[in-house]
Every structure is written in C-alpha cells, then in structure tokens.
Image: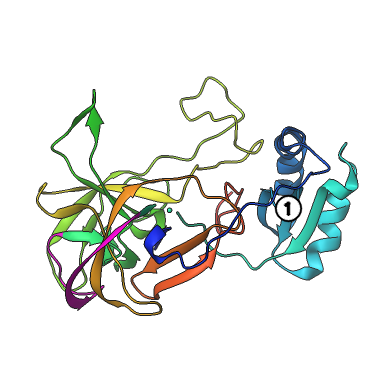
Amino acid sequence: MFFLSPAHVNKRIRYPRIRTGKYSFGELYSWYHEHVIPAATRALGLSLLDIDERRNRIAVYVRDSSLIGAMRRALAALPIPPDAIDIGWMPQGSPQSGGSGRISARRSQSLSDHTRPLVAGLRIHGSTGGAPDSCTLGFNLVPRLGGALQAQRYLVTAGHCIGDLGNQQGGDVRQPSSPYSVATEASDPEYLITDDIYSEYYHPSCPENEYCRLSETVLAQYHYPSLPNHGRAAFPDEDETDYSYLITITDTEEPYQGQIVHKIGATTGRSEGEVSQSCVVYPYPGTN
C-alpha cells in the first residue's frame, strides 16, 4: 500500500497555528539520537520511536500497556528532562509512504484485474520460488542520469513482498490473474550497521549494535519499458477496491503531523487518515 495527499480530494482546509514549545527541535533531536534510541532499542517490547513535533516531546511506544513501567525505568537514568519523553503503548503495525496529483477518468475495474499498462495501487504477487506474497504496487520509477531519463523502468513495493527482507534473491513480480512475470527484483539493500565506520554498510543513524534499514521497500525492474504507466495511480472511491479514475502524481513532499493523506491498498482499497508520526524508528518483527 502507499499514501497520497492529492489537493483535489483534500476536503479540509487547515491553517497553521504557531505555538511556543518548551524544547527546541535541536534539543529533542540530540536527546533522541544520542540517548533515547540506544536505550529504548535495548529495552523490552519497543513498538515505535518518534520525535513528536506537535506535542514537542520524544514519543516512545511499547507493544503492551504492561510494558510501560519497564520502559520508564529503562529511560529514567538518561540525562534528559523527564517531561521531554512521553511513553505510551501502540500495537505493532507496519510503516508506509506518500505524493500528490490530479485525476482522470477511465472504465471501472478492480485493483486485482489484469491491467496494462500497470499503475500504482494494483495488486501484485512477488515470489522467489515458493508461495507468492500478495502486495500492492507502490510507485513506478524512471531513473535519471545526468538529467536525462533512462530507458529502464522500475517499481517500488513492500520489502517483504519479494522474498526475505535484506536478501536480494532475484524474485519475480506478476499480477495475480496472470502467470507471466512483469518485473524482477533489482535492489533489496542489505541491513545497515553502526559499529564499523569502515564498512560499506555503515550508517550513523542505526541504533548501536543493531542492524537497520532506512525503509521497508524493494525495487524491481520491469522486463519492458512499455509495461508501466509512469506517474499514474489507481484512485478508487473510499473503502472500495474498484476504480474508475487514475491520478497523475505531479510532485512529492515531506510528510508532517496532521497532514491528511489517502492510503491506497489492493486489499483494503482507499481510506483517508491523518499523519501521526513520521521518520520513526520501528523494530521490525523477527529481526535483530
């Protein structure tokens, strides 16, 4: 699934309110990276970490309310004002992504139908030889080299859709109603580390002695440049998986708290929500 924030469907006009925060973002950022991430990722039951700009606090979530006390004790000794950290609980979910654009009409069809050319939002199956995983086509991409568009065409989808996350296996992508592959896994970066500055996988944002990734996504290359409809996405009615409209993605933007976005998923259709966190640290289930 993926997120869009098209202006033409944004029914609510919001005007910014400026409030003075107790702590500067620089202070929160420093405490978050230097102290909270290392301590919280070593504690039991972490679900999500974030700098909450709206509340001017560092937000720490555990998987169950019974773990709040243990997390509070784990963070109590940090050289941070106690009220700069809010600890709550949130069942572990999955991180997602975003863009904006304009609409055009077409005949009604399902997100699971055999479709050419392929657009964002369609159901796809990824496989490395075993049972296929059902996922949503994220965005179609065209690479640039020296400002010039290249001939290759790519798609982005969830990292777990094509084999094991962080293990590039050359898996295939196809539509559920077709036996023919449309793309092959091209990039599934290995996990990054922070304990070896000389390693090609070093990244300073990783928690100490932990593996990490900057997103849960994978890149697949289309077999033919004519297969994707670049910059286009299916746009169903709310809570529907049938669609009669395509949206053209015209730009991208950084998500912010309170922003209204529209999620499009092959199974759940389109729904509307509000951004509550962005740029979070998320412990991926079943990994270290």
Name which residue lies at 75% across and 39% down.
28
The quarter in which the N terminus is drawn is bottom left
Q: Is residue 54 left or right of residue 268?
A: right
Name which residue lies at 76% across and 36% down.
24
Above or below, 220 against 271 in this view is above
Above or below, 226 against 47 in this view is above
> Residue 213 at what x, y percent from top left?
50, 43
Q: Which residue is mark 1?
A: 59
Q: Is residue 7 left or right of residue 170?
A: right
Q: Is residue 86 left or right of residue 169?
A: right
Which of these two is toward me, 96 or 135?
96
Could you tell me the amino acid type at mark 1? Ala
> Residue 285 at what x, y percent from top left?
56, 59
Above or below, 64 against 214 in this view is below
Above or below, 276 against 134 in this view is above
The secondary structure type at the circle numbered 1 is strand
Which of these two is toward me, 51 or 126?
51
Magenta range is: 101-117
> Residue 105 at what x, y percent from top left?
20, 69
Q: Is residue 151 left or right of residue 173?
A: left
Which of these two is toward me, 218 or 275?
275
How many neighbours does mark 1 have within 10 angstroms: few (below 14), some (14-19), or many (20 or more)? many
